[in-house]
Image (cartoon, rainbow, N blue to C red):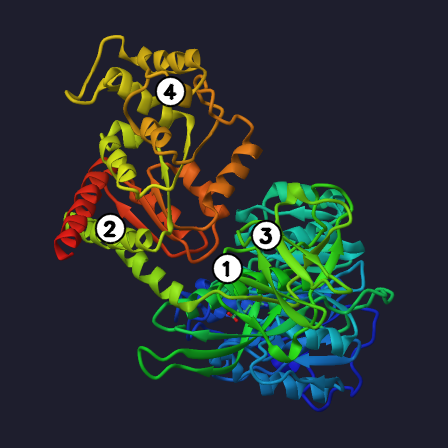
Amino acid sequence: MATQETGHAQGAAPATPPAAGRAAYLMCPPDFYAIDYVINPWMEGNVGRTCPEAATGQWRRLYDRIRGEGGEVELLRPVPGRPDLVFTANAGLALGGKALAAHFRHRERQAEEPIYKEWFEGRGFEVVELPRGIYFEGAGDALPDRGADLLWLGYGIRTVLDACVYVAEEFDIEVVPLRLVDPRFYHLDTCLAPLAGGRMLYYPAAFDERSRRLIETRVSADRRLAVGELDALHFACNCVEIGSTLILHDCSEALERRLAEWDYAVARITLSEFLLAGGSARCLCLRLNEGRAPRAAAPRTEYARRTVSFQGHLLDSGLLAEVLDLITRGGGTFETLEFRPGPRHEDPSYLRLAIGAPTAGALDQLLAHLMQQGGRLDEGERQPAQLAVVEQDGVAPEDFYSTTIYPTDVCVGGGWVRVSGQRMDGVIVVDEGGGDSAATARVVLMRDLRRGQKVVVGVEGLRVHATTEAREERGEFRFMASAVSSERRVEQAVEAIAWEMRQIRRRGGRIVWVPGPVVVHTGGIPYLCELARRGYVQAVLAGNALAVHDIELALYGTSLGVDLRRGVALHGGHRHHLKAINAIRRCGGIAAAVGQGMLGGGLMYELVRHRIPFSLAGSIRDDGPLPETRMNLIDAQAEYARLLEGAEMIMMLSTMLHSIGVGNMTPAGVKMVCVDINPAVATKLADRGSFESRPVVTDVGLFLNLLARKIESLEAESRQGE
Ligand code: ARG
């Protein structure tokens, strides 16, 4: 490329940056353009594949077209061994005579930094730089809006979120960070183009959900145009707008027609050689004199940052990976301020992270998650919990903190108050006390909120005691769950569970059972009855169906019409469960049926006979129901919660809905066993955001049989020992 014909040598340039007026661009002839390395998915397989003549021709046509449309072009002298220097959009962000120099993420392009910087300086720009480690790839990721006084910043692949603070400060402009999630659209200018009058072209799938919503709220529907994947892959968004012309590599006719409605003419310039490296028209030129809309009074950036620390078995438990992943997936960034790995298996590690998020709200959400993983807001920053007043019965204030299963403290009036009634998915109601009465805090369900109550909002002044021991065990259980559950494994699990049950009963603890109707179908009832008689059942939480089939079995020997002793379906047997319901209804209820001698066996019979409390919660598919079944689900939830109080162990037997319901009401520290033949269900239950919970993948009837035998032999052994 004949640089001398088009450009002025560096140094000979006028020493003031181009003023507003004709659009001025910086371009770099592709004399040394090539694909020498791979730093984006486009470059894969293309090393050494470019054709210098073709590239030069294509670049030249772009250059001519920009000038033909009235644009001014200044040239940067190409440098051997710097193949990506042609993509001048990444040189930095030039706005109002100031240039924020790029810090490239990849070492391959870091070598370009001094070249761009020198050019900016020689051209009279005031050059500013970011701290080390704050990656920022210039106008490739920083696009001023052309209607409002704001700047869109792409982050997550090349540029880091934290850059938005510096951009906002240096240019005194509102910065709206957008997270890029598709590696093919690694720079913001590959998937979004702000156009004159506040219009915008963008490819929605390149962004995360929050960013998409942000675009949709900041740019009205009539001013934004979502392009399809094909147009996006043709780099339609990577266009150069000069007057009413959009210069781009290629786009569909449909998109062209829609742009025509906005009075744009599309000028196609083939740039296939540059597409091989993942760049197109806009990447090849840096706008030097972008105009600014009148200053808005908006805050410069909503970016928020906070320090959190973790202590525990971060490495072997996999918690470290989990935490970092959570932050990134949540659209945030982290900076490790301190990390001390525990030198040996039994030593805990210590980690302190600065966490950044695009908005204060997003940060709170992230922090709430991290606190659930054992994260602590930095001590020095401890503040009283923020409270908001309930204004409508049954409705929580916006930004309410939602509870977890872990013990939680709230900072009220300068001291920590332990929250009572811990369970997940509730809110915390605080009574600040006064006079002689101390402050209190308790978990309340949204529907039970009353006007005037004070509810904790945000995450300030909260301390969650998520124990790392629990997490270690959980890791172990997960391993158990993922391994195919051999018979020996089930036996081992039964042994451990039986031992645990004996311990609990010795100290008078409570074991609550949550059986599904499968317990009846698989022949588990006699064993569960035996366990009830031996004193291992302190409450039963179930649905209508469990009781119905249990009673059907007691009265007719069938379960859903199947003869359980012979395993064959009886002719007309499907009516049995309806007959059972009818018989109980005639008596006035289960307890009455037992009293009248009508019902003489089965689980429900044993429960009534031994005065073991039970609750039957109704559902939409219930037949009958039995008189005892609570069809008012709020009452049923309340009764479940009451029967769960003080439980030390919960046996969930092949019922997904009742188990999940119970899991939601249960604080951390309660042992849960989830038995299901379907590994997905067993692990799903065991994995629900928590707990000290053990999946056992097996037939529930066999499981109960094994368990009853194990308990029997343990009891026999201990009698012998006496
Ligand atoms: N190969 C270059 C890279 O991966 C292409 C840069 C394209 N520039 C742009 N503004 N999108 O960095």
Residue 199, x across and y down, in percent: 75, 52
Pick whichever of labels 2 and 4 is earlier in the sequence.
2
Q: Residue at x 18, y 51 (%)?
A: 714
Q: CA distance from mark 1 to mark 2?
A: 26 Å
On whether ligand 1 comes within 8 Å of the CB at mark 4, the answer is no
Residue with the mark numbered 2? 498
Which residue does the numbered mark 1 point to in the structure image?
406
* Left or right of 431 in this view: 660: left
Secondary element type, mark 1: loop
Residue kind at label 3, given as amino acid type: Glu
Quarter-wise, where is residue 434 in the image?
bottom right
Q: Earlier in the sequence, mark 1 or mark 3?
A: 3
Real-space CA distance between mark 3 and mark 4, rounded to the nearest whole angstrom? 60 Å
Residue 321 position within the rendered picture, expressed as x and y whole percent measured from the top left: 42, 68
Mark toward the start of the polypeptide (1 vs 2): 1
Residue 484 place in picture, x, y as percent: 21, 50
* Distance of label 2 from label 4 (alpha carbons): 33 Å
Tell me the amino acid under the disc marked 2.
Answer: Ala
Disc 1, disc 2: CB below 8 Å? no
- Residue holding disc 4: 595
The mark lying in front, picked from 1 and 4, is 4
Marks 1, 3: nearer the viewer = 1
> Answer yes or no: do the residues labelled 1 and 3 have beta carbons within 8 Å?
no
Label 3 packing within 10 angstroms: few (<14), some (14-19), many (20+): some
Quarter of the image where the C terminus is located: bottom left
| Spatial CA span between label 1 and label 3 | 29 Å
